[in-house]
Image (spheres, rainbow, N blue to C red):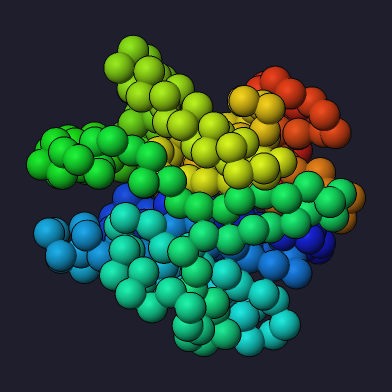
């Protein structure tokens, strides 16, 4: 039976690419029902589709149909476009299929905390000012993801069920990548703090996390390419980072005034 939560936050799904982990996302959506879904950018990867052509699997189509169906059945769905689906920014202020398109969004949790929700690409100096470097990085990242897909198939043949991301592993081991992530986190958190928010929820960098920075709660949803992660809000306002690993899920809690990033608190078999 699906678990009922107040809100689900999803970012960087990258529908339209081979890297999208649509099957795992479908398993996650089957396990959770919510009153609100917030799509935090890079949901459909128009940029990759223009460069490499469209890859649209049956599972990806089902993901889209499932979100549209929930929007038709009293689930509030809000879409904050990112840099890979930035064409949708031309339609900010409109709705399609009961999905509201906004530039950013203020989410008030059940405990009264106000979270600014944005994709985050405006805080990425490479994306903003050095587009050619960004494109070069996209190509290298795409190659890494293709290698990752090969390793995933090999792991399945060897009977290793748990999902593991080579791209995520490389990012965690590269000093320059770690420094970029830290700088991004502090820029986003400072922006939210300066505007009087209690927290900020974003995506963009494919690095899920929850921690307190500059006096606000920094929450990154992660992605459905590398880490297969999402953020959910429970009925009491508690935020939870869920890493969906196929055979099991790792749940990371952000409780009350807990300020530090925490390791997975529990491992539970998926429904």
**Where in the figure is residue 205, as x and y percent of width and height?**
40, 38
Say above or below: 43 vs 92: above
Viewer-side residue, 31 vs 229: 229
**In the visual, does 140 lie left or right of 28?**
left
**In the visual, does 184 lie left or right of 196?**
left
**In the visual, does 127 lie left or right of 172?**
left
Q: From this viewpoint, is residue 44 visible?
A: yes
**Where in the figure is residue 39, as x and y percent of width and height?**
53, 62
User: At x 75% / y 69%, what residue is drawn?
Assistant: 35
- Image quadrant holding the N terminus, namely bottom right
Viewer-side residue, 25 vs 220: 220
User: At x 70% / y 20%, what residue is drawn?
Assistant: 260
**Where in the figure is residue 187, as x and y percent of width and height?**
46, 31
Q: Quadrant of residue 49?
A: bottom left
Say above or below: 126 vs 70: above
**Where in the figure is residue 3, as x and y percent of width and height?**
80, 58
């Amino acid at each position: 039976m699906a678990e009922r939560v107040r809100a689900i936050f999803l970012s960087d799904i990258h529908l339209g690419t081979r890297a999208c982990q649509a099957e795992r996302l479908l398993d996650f959506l089957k396990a959770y029902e919510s009153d609100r879904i917030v799509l935090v950018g890079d949901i459909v990867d128009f940029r990759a589709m223009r460069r490499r052509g469209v890859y649209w699997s049956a599972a990806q189509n089902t993901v889209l149909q499932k979100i549209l169906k929930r929007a038709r059945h009293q689930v509030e769905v809000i879409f904050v476009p990112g840099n890979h689906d930035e064409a949708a920014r031309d339609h900010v202020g409109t709705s399609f299929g009961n999905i509201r398109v906004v530039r950013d969004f203020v989410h008030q949790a059940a405990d009264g905390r106000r979270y600014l929700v944005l994709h985050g690409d405006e805080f990425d100096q490479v994306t903003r000012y050095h587009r050619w470097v960004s494109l070069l990085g996209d190509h290298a990242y795409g190659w890494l993801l293709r290698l990752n897909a090969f390793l995933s198939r090999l792991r399945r043949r060897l009977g290793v069920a748990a999902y593991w991301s080579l791209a995520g592993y490389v990012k965690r081991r590269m000093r320059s990548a770690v420094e970029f992530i830290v700088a991004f986190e502090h820029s986003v958190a400072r922006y939210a703090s300066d505007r009087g928010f209690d927290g900020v929820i974003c995506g963009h960098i494919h690095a899920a996390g929850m921690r307190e920075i500059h006096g606000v709660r920094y929450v990154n949803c992660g992605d459905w390419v590398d880490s297969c992660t999402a953020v959910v809000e429970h009925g009491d306002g508690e935020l939870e980072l869920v890493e969906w690993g196929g055979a099991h899920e790792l749940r990371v809690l952000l409780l009350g005034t807990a300020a530090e990033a925490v390791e997975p608190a529990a491992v539970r078999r998926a429904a």
